[in-house]
Image (tube, grey):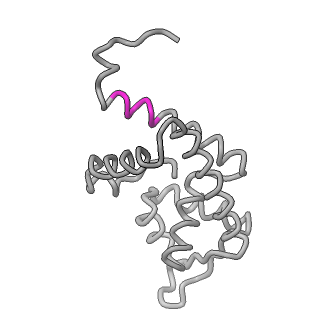
Amino acid sequence: MDEIPQRLAVKPSWLITQLAVHVRRLVSDGFTAAGARGYHYRILAALHEFGPASQAQLGRRCRIDRSDIVAAVNELVEQGHVDRTPDPEHGRRNRVTLTRDGVRQLRYMDGVLDQVQDELLKSLSAEERQTLTRLLQQVLPTTNRSDPVRGH
């Protein structure tokens, strides 16, 4: 691999960008092997934690664009991981519910992400991992946490 200029190698912004590319590849590869996508994980996790929701609520909660949430929910319905039924309280809205198969898939995907974390952070001690997580949470502005992003 070619050397990079030193002024880049010492910039946290450049390092974080390079790490994000690496992480995205690891997560994508892990989820692809599981027959899933990052959007699937986010939707299943939200349904598991917060219960049934409309597609619009899921999109906002999971930071998934409206144009992508419908396709992702359609895929999860086809796979039997969620049910989508008309919302009895609102005629034009669908209610999405996690199925037992969806819970199993979520647990499986949790394991995939755990393996990715272990691979990614294998050179760090448990304490260093906690410190890194805390620092990343501090640096990430709360306004950016609500922007739609791809991945998990």
As displayed, is residue 2 above or below residue 72? Answer: above
Q: Is residue 92 above or below residue 128?
A: below
Residue 72, horizontal then vertical, whole percent: 59, 59
Work out whether residue 140 or residue 122 is closer to the camera in this orientation and state it: 122
Question: In the displayed structure, does residue 114 sit left or right of residue 14?
Answer: right
Q: As drawn, which residue projects farthest toward the top? A: 2
Q: Position of residue 116 (x, y in %)?
A: 59, 45
Judged by its main secondary structure, the magenta piece is: helix
Visible in this render: residue 93? yes
Verify whether residue 148 appears in magenta: no
In this rendering, would 142 be left or right of 24?
left
Q: Nearer the viewer, residue 99 or 112?
A: 112
The magenta stretch spans which residues? Answer: 14-20
Q: From the top left corner, tell me how far across and down residue 42 is, in percent.
A: 53, 60
**Residue 73: quarter of image:** bottom right
Dividing the picture into quarters, in which one does residue 65 lie? Answer: bottom left
Camera-nearest residue between 115 and 16 = 115
Residue at the spot 58% in from the left edge and 75% down from the top edge: 96
Which percent across, then down, holds residue 146?
Answer: 34, 57
Tell me how many marks there are. Answer: 0
Residue 24 visible to the viewer: no
